[in-house]
Amino acid sequence: MAVPNAEASAAKRLGRRKRKRRKAPWWELPVLVAVAILVAVLVKTFVIQPFFIPSPSMEKTLHGCTGCKGDRILVNKPIYDLRDPHPGDIVVFHAPPGWNEEPASKPPPNPVVRALRGFGQLVGFVPPDGLVLVKRVIAMGGQTIKGVSLNGRDEIMISEHGTAGPWRTLNEPYTYYDVDDPRAAFGPVTVPKGRLWVMGDHRNDSADSRFHCGAGAAQGANDASCDPVASTVPINEVIGKAVVIAWPPSRWRTLGTPSTFKNAALALAGEQPFLGGALLMVPVYLVRRRRRRLP
């Protein structure tokens, strides 16, 4: 007879628990949504941000075109607070003033539309305000770069010791040409310290450093006509490093560093082991951010 009594007691306890259950307060869902948005904003601001590809200048590595639904990439933002960009990195950056060939977009006056636009920018489905570009770093401050056409081949050459050389020819299987490139020959140009020479993988359809080399860029600029400042990007305008094609799912892959940039002269281009640098991440991050803010 003890068993039925135990069962009855358990049933009573279960009934009391059910009676004690209350509906979630009305404000719980809005709070959860607000927390989720806050987390997304913090991640976007300090860690990872999605961007869409606005043009075909990086084909066929990254797909994109004006007005179409191109690739969406994820960009690592804090990495360049720990180190400078290196040749081979695909970077997202604010275009220098002279590169902005179209007027920057202005936020819509309607607050609802502005909020929707902000959310679209948050998830990478709406272009950011201002001109933001995606290119590959080919040379960094202190390096000298030139383009040559030899035996029907267009090649990029890099020197670590100025125009005297020696010169190293880049092996660039990632580049794409759909027509002959009239701007293949340029330079030599020495990249100023603190700046980057960037180029699109779609070499004959990219308004990049070579395009902005000087007034004679359409016919191929030379050392006399190429402005090394106007044709390069300040490091402090770089938003981050593209690390993954996140959309569409059929094109998901990581974006690494081409082997032509992984050599002794550019040994620093390799990623540092995460665990070894983890303890130094916070202080180095804060120091570099403070330096960037100084005039």
Image: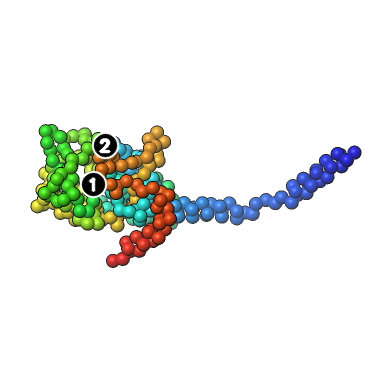
Is any atom of residue 218 visible in this view? no
Q: Nearer the viewer, residue 58 or 107?
A: 58
Q: Is residue 169 left or right of residue 77?
A: left
Which label belongs to residue 105? none
At 41% from the left edge and 36% from the top edge, which residue is drawn? 249
Structural crowding at the residue carrying mark 1, measured as other residues with C-alpha within 10 Å and reported as few (<14), some (14–19) or many (≥20):
few
Name the amino acid, label 2: Tyr
Residue 209 percent across, percent down from the top left: 20, 48
Name the amino acid, label 1: Ala
Which label belongs to residue 174? 2
Give the residue pinned by disc 1. Answer: 265
Quadrant of the frame with the C terminus: bottom left
Q: Secondary structure at mark 2?
A: loop
Residue 2 percent across, percent down from the top left: 88, 40
Q: Nearer the viewer, residue 115 or 176?
A: 176
Residue 174 percent across, percent down from the top left: 26, 37
Is any atom of residue 270 visible in this view? yes
At 23% from the left edge and 38% from the top edge, which residue is drawn? 172
At 40% from the left edge and 52% from the top edge, which residue is drawn? 277
Residue, far right: 1
Q: Is residue 286 left or right of residue 169?
A: right
